[in-house]
Image (spheres, rainbow, N blue to C red):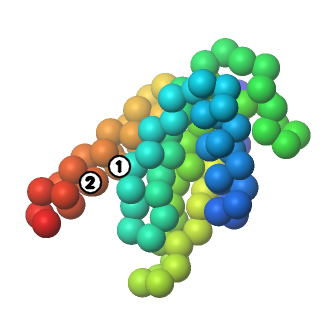
């Protein structure tokens, strides 16, 4: 199944994260530059997000615009490799930044 990618607002991101947490999903937050990144293993479920059925993995990534601004991209995927590659990359980058400070 093809991945779903779309830009979302911070308000929409907060609503998604809160809804998942209310349903007892483990949502991992990885701090970003100006906005946080979120990773969640949804698994097999019938949850819907607007008009899209959630996939096995939900990712919200900060996308750099300039020094003062970032946007958010929502990615819904069934591909474990995509999910874990992004998660490991963001965690590694965050860990490196924390060690430099």
| Residue ID at (21%, 60%) | 97
Tag shown at residue 90? 1
Which residue is disc 2 drawn over? Answer: 93
Confirm whether residue 29 shows in the render.
Answer: yes
On-image quarter of the C terminus: bottom left
Q: Residues within 10 Å of mark 2 (few under 14, many from 20)?
A: few
Task: Out of 8 and 4, give the one closest to the viewer.
Answer: 8
The location of residue 57, given as percent across then percent down, is: 58, 30
The location of residue 98, given as percent across then percent down, is: 19, 58
Query: 92 above or below 78?
Result: below
On-image quarter of the N terminus: top right
Q: Quick one: which residue is furthest to the front in this view?
A: 22
Q: How far is disc 1 from disc 2 in space, using C-alphas?
A: 5 Å
Q: Quick one: which residue is furthest to the top in this view?
A: 44
Q: Do the residues under discs 1 and 2 have CB atoms within 8 angstroms? A: yes
Query: 94 above or below 75?
Result: below
- Give the left or right position of residue 3, taking residue 27 as reference: right
| Residue ID at (61%, 19%) | 43
Q: Residues within 10 Å of mark 1 (few under 14, many from 20)?
A: some
Confirm whether residue 5 shows in the render.
Answer: no
- Give the left or right position of residue 78, taking residue 1 as reference: left
The location of residue 96, given as percent across then percent down, is: 18, 55
């Amino acid at each position: 199944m093809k991945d779903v990618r779309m830009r979302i607002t911070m308000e929409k991101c907060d609503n998604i994260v809160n809804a998942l947490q209310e349903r007892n999903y483990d949502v991992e937050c990885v701090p970003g530059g100006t906005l946080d990144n979120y990773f969640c293993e949804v698994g097999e479920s019938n949850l819907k997000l607007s008009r899209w059925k959630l996939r096995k993995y939900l990712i919200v990534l900060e996308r750099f615009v300039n020094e003062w601004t970032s946007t958010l991209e929502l990615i819904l995927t069934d591909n474990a490799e995509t999910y874990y590659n992004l998660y490991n990359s963001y965690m590694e980058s965050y860990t490196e930044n924390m060690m430099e400070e």
